[in-house]
Amino acid sequence: MKNRQWKTVLFTAGFLAVCEGIAFAADGTWLDTKSGWQYIKEDGQNARNSWEDIDGEWYHFDADGHMQTGWQKVGNLRYYFEADGTLSEGWQCYTGDGPEQWYFYDKSGNAVIRWLKDNGKWYWFNGNGILSTERVKTIDGKKYYFHEDGSLLANEYSGFKYFDADGQPYAPGNVRAINDNEREIKIEEGLRDEIAEELNALPKGWLRNFVDNGWTFVYCPEKEYYSSSRDPETGERYYIRYKVDNLACELRFTRPEALKEGFGEYLFRKVKQEMRDLDFTTEMRVRMYEILEFTEVPDSYNSDYGMLFGVLFSKYLDEDNRAEMEEKLGNVAWYMERALQSRGEDGKLIERK
């Protein structure tokens, strides 16, 4: 299977010109028998125990010459064939008589073995093409950690532990938790998982940039807030529960929900320096009244563009708020998207022409 080339011409049994149980293909003839479809090749021989590339699709025929459908074992690997006999692509789940087993078939119809990257995540398949569901697995002498769904822990957090882009634990990226005396404290597992969920919702390229540049997340639960302002109209106080410390390269936060706002301010400072073609500050100044109304931030913060960008960033990550922002703030939402997409998976700035 490895060396077969995929053709672009699509074919299904429904497209065959059928006449009294006979259908013609590019290089042979289909025959509809009582026991199933057979294929007569150009030399007049039945396809038996063989793979056949017919009009750009792969089929397999058993020892009796019948087209196979459903799950079939060919050699040491298991394959899935659609109802029309064509070899499947993508994810397929085999249940059989035991626990479910997942396979992935590439565009050439090969069952993937070893590593696969799909939709930004890495997976490992054993020599029989079955997805590994081990939480910890040693591969080529290196230990890797996986989620329950088989995807690799990479450039993300599990609790307070950070795993780098290669799926390896990276202690400098771990979240620290401290008290008011700057001493390390323990945090219960459920809260660690809640914080990890907030961190893993951040744009992956920017998260890698953050860690690769030596920055650290510091959780400070005993600290109520870092600054506040009272709304002169309502008398309510607005609290900022994070601090972006450029000297220490730390993002401190007092509540899990403050993480995204703080990270948004970090992103703003980087973008302001690197994407000078996008004048965020000018756009925010022009739309300031609408921004304050949308974010419900007091007017006293109308010149703190980094903080305001952080609040907008946090809201933009929420799908419902994003739709409202696009409707009410126009270009501000567009700038936000440009900023979020300005880093590649490697954490580096994407050069735009």
Image: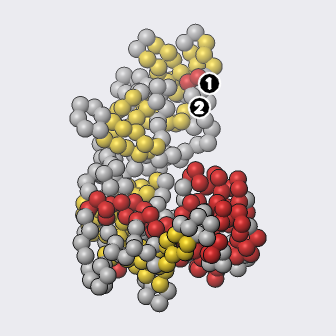
Residue 68, image quadrant: top left
| Secondary structure at numbered mark 1 | helix
Q: CA distance from mark 1 to mark 2?
A: 7 Å
Identify which residue, 303 or 246, lies in the foreground. Answer: 303
- Residue 161: image tag: none
Does any portion of residue 168 appear in the rendered image?
Answer: no
Residue 209, given in percent of the width and then of the height, sits at 49, 75
- Quadrant location of the N terminus in the rendered image: top left
Q: Position of residue 215 (x, y in %)?
A: 44, 81
Front-most of residues 39 and 258: 258
Q: Residue at x 59, y 54 (%)?
A: 321
Quarter of the rendering containing residue 284:
bottom right
Residue drawn at (26%, 62%), measured in percent from left and top? 189
Query: Which residue type does callout 2 highlight?
Result: Phe
Q: In terms of depth relative to the viewer, which is nearer, 224 or 312?
A: 224
Residue 148, compared with residue 286, is above or below; it is above
Point 66% across, 74% down: residue: 302
What amino acid is at disc 1?
Answer: Phe
If the image is split into quadrants, where does the C terminus sit?
A: bottom right
Mark 1 sits on what residue? 15
Element type at marker 2? loop
Coloring basis for residues? secondary structure
Callouts 1 and 2 close, C-beta under 8 Å:
yes
Which residue position holds label 2?
A: 11
Residue at the limit of the structure toward the right, as seen here: 286
Q: Nearer the viewer, residue 284 or 109?
A: 284
**Residue at (39% x, 29% y) in the render:** 70
Q: Is residue 191 visible?
A: yes
Quarter-wise, where is residue 177 in the image? bottom left
Left or right, residue 252 beside residue 340 = left
Q: Residues within 10 Å of mark 1 (few under 14, many from 20)?
A: few
Residue 235 vertical position relative to residue 152 in the rendered view, above or below: below
